[in-house]
Image (cartoon, helix red, strand yellow):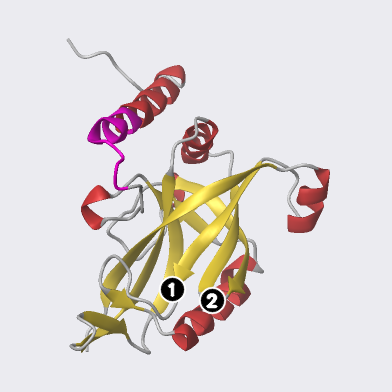
């Protein structure tokens, strides 16, 4: 079976600014750290995929050893269709991963890069963002469950931060939440990004 780029989405919430105690805990000098669910094992996700826990656990341990322990567990802002992390768009660094039941949890440091500053501004503004895993692997059809199961050849690449991917149903929201609320959030995100780019001299006014 040939490998494909597998992309998954989860909501991710900030825990606030790093104080001295938190900085010592995660071994970082300061800044913003966010934590939440990175991935979920054993359950069909929004894309109809199931990640067996032993496969996800294997890749988490590998990622810990090869990336987190070497302080290079980098991710991007928004999801490129690539199996390579683009350093020009890096916004964060994974500090720690751990299991909570079938949920793979993570603590993430927001970096002082251009993309990291945009990401921090979005969190500061209370925007709900998602965490999106990127990996390579093949899947097998599970007809009874109407799902596909990720196979042993799966390789975890990284975790990226993304805006609300509404076409993929990434975020679970109250059923009575209005479309107008989603539209306002989208406009708010665009205004924040435009403001940051203009302050850095990277925007231009169209005629």
Q: How many numbered callouts?
A: 2
Residue in the picture at 31% in, 54% down: 80
Element assignment for label 2: helix
**Residue 36 percent coordinates (x, y):** 55, 57
The quarter of the image holding the N terminus is bottom left
Is 206 on the left-hand or right-hand side of 121? Answer: left
Residue in the picture at 27% in, 55% down: 169
Q: Is residue 34 above or below residue 73?
A: above
Is 206 on the left-hand or right-hand side of 161? Answer: left
Which of disc 2 and disc 1 is earlier in sequence?
2
Q: Which image quadrant is residue 41 in? A: bottom left
The quarter of the image holding the C terminus is top left
Residue in the picture at 59% in, 72% down: 100
> Mark 1 to mark 2: distance in Å?
8 Å
**Residue 31 percent coordinates (x, y):** 67, 40
Is 55 on the left-hand or right-hand side of 61? Answer: left
Q: Nearer the viewer, residue 132 or 86?
A: 132
Residue in the picture at 75% in, 45% down: 29
Residue 184: in magenta span: yes
Question: Looking at the image, do the residues carrying marks 1 and 2 touch, with CB atoms under 8 Å apart?
Answer: yes
What type of secondary structure mainly makes up the magenta span?
helix
**Residue 12 percent coordinates (x, y):** 49, 52
Boundaries of the magenta span? 175-185
What residue sits right under mark 1 in the picture? 156
Element assignment for label 1: strand
Disc 2 crowd rating (10 Å Cα; few below 14, some 14-19, many 20+) is many
State the mark number for residue 60: 2
Disc 1 crowd rating (10 Å Cα; few below 14, some 14-19, many 20+) is many
Residue 126: in magenta span: no
Q: Nearer the viewer, residue 165 or 120?
A: 165
Q: Is residue 175 above or below residue 1?
A: above
């Amino acid at each position: 079976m040939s490998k494909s780029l597998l992309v998954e989405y989860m909501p991710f919430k900030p825990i606030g600014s790093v104080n001295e105690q938190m900085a010592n805990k995660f071994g970082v000098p300061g800044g913003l750290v966010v934590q939440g669910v990175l991935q979920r094992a054993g359950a069909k996700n929004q894309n109809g995929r199931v990640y067996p826990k032993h496969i996800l656990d294997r890749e988490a341990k590998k990622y810990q050893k090869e990336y987190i322990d070497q302080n290079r567990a980098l991710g991007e802002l928004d999801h490129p269709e690539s199996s390579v992390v683009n350093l020009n768009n890096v916004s964060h660094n994974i500090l720690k991963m751990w299991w909570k039941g079938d949920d793979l949890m993570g603590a993430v440091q927001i970096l002082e890069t251009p993309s990291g500053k945009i990401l921090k501004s979005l969190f500061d503004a209370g925007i709900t963002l998602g965490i999106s895993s990127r990996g390579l692997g093949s899947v097998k059809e599970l007809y009874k469950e109407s799902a596909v199961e990720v196979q042993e050849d799966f390789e975890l690449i990284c975790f990226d931060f993304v805006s609300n991917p509404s076409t993929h149903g990434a975020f679970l929201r109250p059923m009575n939440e209005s479309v107008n609320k989603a539209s306002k959030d989208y406009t708010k995100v665009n205004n924040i990004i435009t403001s940051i780019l203009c302050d850095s001299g990277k925007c231009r006014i169209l005629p």
